[in-house]
Image (cartoon, rainbow, N blue to C red):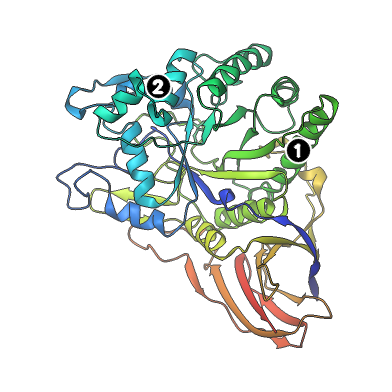
Amino acid sequence: MSTIRIDLDRAIGTVDRQIFGGFIEHEGRSIYGGVVDRIDSPLTDDRGFRADVAAALKELYLPILRWPGGNFVSGYHWVDGIGPQESRHPRLDLAWNAVEPNRFGTDEFFAYCAELGTEPYLCFNMGTGTLDEALAWVEYCNGDRDTYWANKRRENGHDKPYGVRYWGLGNEMWGDWQVGHMTAEAYAAEAKRWALALRRLDPEIRLVACGRNGWSDWDQLVIDELVRYVDYHSIHMYSGSDDYWSNVLSPLQAERSIKACAAMIERARYVQHVAHPVRVIYDEWNVWFATRGDRRADRVVEERHTLADALAVATYLNVFVRNCVPLHMANMAQMVNVLAPIVTADDGMFVQAIYHPFRLASRRTLGTALDVWVDAPVHEFSDIPDDRVVNRIADMGPFPLLDAAATTDEDRRTVVVSVVNRSLDDVRARVEVGPRARIARVAAELIDAPSEDSVNSFDAPDVIRVTDGAAPVAQSESALDYAFPAHSVTWLRLELE
Ligand code: AHR
């Protein structure tokens, strides 16, 4: 029998709810056809927001939403997207070879965030954009004095400053697909110049440096050069593979990324005597492999997510909870149509497999992460997976077939555990909460489907959904035996006496 041992006395740290953030970009049908749609559609409200999509997003309790890109931002001039909609101009978007109509701009994004009850996180254009433009954007959003851009906001009907806290210093500036990409040295020098000026304008803003994957030379240099000037270092990760084991295990790379990145930050802070904390933000993450390289402007990167992808997403979220001390925020990329949990058509929508683990994690996770020890049968790569796995993880094995993360509330009366069973068979495990705890009640929720390749679709939207999980096979005062179904995600809620 496997064991999942939860140590109630060993709190890892506080889980920042920002790890359940989202990201929407002007790409494919993410904004147009996803977030907003034809004003005469029965699915849109009077602002053009799709009510069905907004309702599905509200279910996710997103604490933060990143916008407008992504690659798109590196050619985006925010001024094109303000003022009366009829006087806005379409522009060429070089990132996705598309025409950007500019119907959805800064004020519409804030209205959307207000609709969802989420906090906005904006990313600057450091590709074709200028520092002057960035300063003007902050002034437009946050200025409270009698100045040109603050007055423009007022003219556009928004008297009160929006008070945007989070600002990203560029997106993936290290990649040659990024319009205006740079060397690490050039980026660090430019970002420092921007950071110093932006803080003069608004000392309250929180600045996010543009990192890469967490362990690269780019990360190292940017951290060393910017640690004094920023509040966060952002990293991105997309994983996935046609190979089931590579797909479900790759997210564990995020664990290595966060640790490596946090260590580099700690080193830089110590060596440079930097007093303020600098934490990690996973500002893009998801499963993305089937449509990689697809650069069609229309249905670009509309990944169809399987149950295996849902297991991968649940694993990412477990990793984020386990690493809650260095990790401040994480944003699923993206939320609608593009790689996303929500897929729309003119007359409706459905939610993909990955929607369910995200929703459960966002709603069920409690405030304090607990140490969890897992002993289970393992998977070991027997071939040479490094050749075909996007994220090289084979060296991190052997991998327990169960992956778990646990959280508790302030008075330790409730413990919730997220368990990913990546085995293709049921796995029976004893879940222990320590000798002093007495389990009064157990509730279980389950995500599974007939096969690891199962998908939801318009025709069959509920193949993968959340159901009540089975009762424990056996239960004592401080432990229970539970049969975790093959390829599944289970959320156990233990009420303690
Ligand atoms: O989310 C899709 C793209 O992936 C983003 O535009 C970019 O930042 C990343 O490469």
The quarter of the rendered structure image containing the C terminus is bottom right
Report if the beta carbon of the residue with label 2 is closer than 8 angstroms to ligand 1.
no
Asked whether residue 141 appears in the rendered view, the answer is yes
Disc 2 is placed on an element classified as loop
Residue 262's disc number: 1
Q: Residue at x 54, y 29 (%)?
A: 168
Q: Residues within 10 Å of mark 1 (few under 14, many from 20)?
A: many
| Residue 192 relative to residue 150: left or right | right
Element type at marker 1?
Answer: helix
Outermost residue, left side: 40
| Residue 223 image point, x, y percent | 72, 26
Q: Is residue 284 above or below residue 305?
A: above
Q: Depth check: 442 or 355 in front?
A: 442
Amino acid type, callout 1: Ala
Q: Amino acid at mark 2?
A: Tyr
Q: x, y percentage for residue 101?
A: 27, 27
Whichever of labels 1 and 2 marks the residue nearer the N terminus, that label is: 2
Q: Which residue is mark 2?
A: 76
Left or right of 334 in this view: 108: left
- Residue 474: quadrant of the picture: bottom right
Q: What mark, if any, has residue 495 been given in the picture?
A: none
Count the numbered circles shown.
2
Instruction: Answer whether labels 1 and 2 touch (C-beta < 8 Å).
Output: no
Residue 348 location in percent, x, y?
27, 55
